[in-house]
Image (cartoon, grey):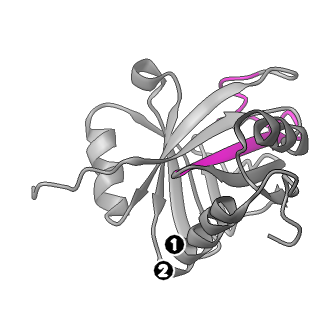
Amino acid sequence: MPMLERYDFFQEAYFVNDVEQACEKWNKLYRAGPFVIVPHHKTDSFMYRGTDQEADVSYAFGYLGDMMIQFIAQHDETPSIYRDMYGPGEEGFHHVGLLVNNYAEEKQRIMDMGFELACELHADDVDACYIDTRTTSGGFTELHDDPAHILNTFAGWKRAHELWRAGDAAIMQGG
């Protein structure tokens, strides 16, 4: 097997009760953002632990320096990678994200280490999966492939963070 690249974390993700409140709090405390909110996200294909159960979730994405910060809120009690860690009303760290250009190889490499594929999805022409690495990292590991359109989207969000000034909105309208 050829030597694979080393991938740095590009994202830290937190499970929260309210994505808008989390955006406002992190913006005030850390000057993170501005954030883009994706309400009630839907995928093109979805698998959670061998089923097609897809929870109703909303996301927020923004930057703090070079790190993308993601907030996730689940609006129902459907079994999910989020409910694997947190019950109703609970909040906290959920996963780190790796932006990879060898998605299938990296997924197989981590699974070959004995970690379980918990969730895999395809949305917006992007493949992503969540591997249950809680025994090592305290959270899940997301692998996210890196097509040009998503890299451009992320670059735009990062640029918005670089241009953000005190007094600007914590949440971008229209993303």
Q: Which contiguous range is marked in magenta?
A: 67-86
Q: Position of residue 39 (x, y in %)?
A: 87, 57
Q: Position of residue 81 (x, y in %)?
A: 64, 36
**Which residue has dot 2 on it?**
148
- Give the position of the C terminus as an image quadrant: bottom right
Overall secondary structure of the magenta section? loop
Q: CA distance from mark 1 to mark 2?
A: 5 Å
Residue shown at 56%/73% (left/top)? Answer: 150
Residue shown at 43%/35% (left/top)? Answer: 116
- Give the position of the N terminus as an image quadrant: bottom left
Residue shown at 90%/38% (left/top)? Answer: 21
Three-letter code for the amino acid on which mark 1 is drawn: Leu
In the displayed structure, 157 sits above or below 49; it is: below
Label 2: how many Cα within 10 Å (few below 14, some 14–19, many 20+): few
Q: Are marks 1 and 2 in contact (CB under 8 Å)?
A: yes
> Any mark on residue 151, and which?
1
Depth check: 88 or 120 in front?
A: 88
Three-letter code for the amino acid on which mark 2 is drawn: Ala
Q: Position of residue 73 (x, y in %)?
A: 81, 40
> Any mark on residue 51, and which?
none
Q: Would residue 116 appear left or right of 159 to someone viewing this image?
A: left
Residue shown at 62%/32% (left/top)? Answer: 94
Secondary structure category for the residue under label 2: helix
Residue at the front extreme, as displayed:
166
Secondary structure category for the residue under label 1: helix
Q: Would residue 55 appear left or right of 7 to someone viewing this image?
A: right
